[in-house]
Image: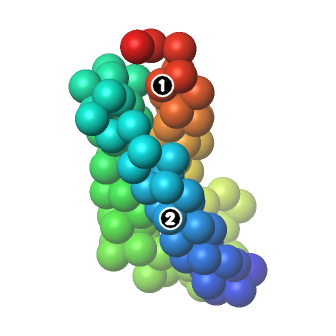
Amino acid sequence: LSRQLLPLTWLGAAIMFVTGVLLFAPQAARIYANPALQAKLVLLLLAGINVVVWHALLARNLDAWDTRARPPWQARLAGSLSLLLWSGIIVAGRLIAFIL
């Protein structure tokens, strides 16, 4: 399933990047110093690192996980971090409009 969904995640990331730049560009000078934007960018960087670690180290053994009752703790940690980081990205993105 993950191999089938990976192209969709890349498409979603590309759409997110393009629309984010389009939202940022008109008021870039005004919101660049916004702490919520800075927090969002840091969280995006951390989420990107999490994805790289996932694909470089953890996802290589996906087939072996089918025989286990639970995924390895590293995979569960990466998934939990992903949920936490993306929740933070959403909250920080919403706060940009309210912190001037």
- Image quarter hosting the N terminus: bottom right
Residue 46 visible, this angle: yes
Q: Give the farthest residue toward the top.
A: 99
What percent of the width, then of the height, locates residue 84? Answer: 53, 35
Does 17 appear above or below 8? above
> Mark 1 sits on what residue?
96
- Image quarter hosting the C terminus: top left
Dot 2: element: helix
Front-lying residue, 90 or 86: 90
Identify the residue at horizontal 32%, vertical 21% (top origin): 35
Amino acid residing under circle 2 = Val
Identify the residue at horizontal 52%, vertical 33% (top origin): 93
Does 100 appear above or below 2? above
Q: In the drawing, does residue 48 fall left or right of residue 87? A: left
> Mark 2 sits on what residue?
18
The crowd level at tag 2 (other Cα within 10 Å; few <14, some 14-19, many 20+) is few
Amino acid residing under circle 1 = Ile
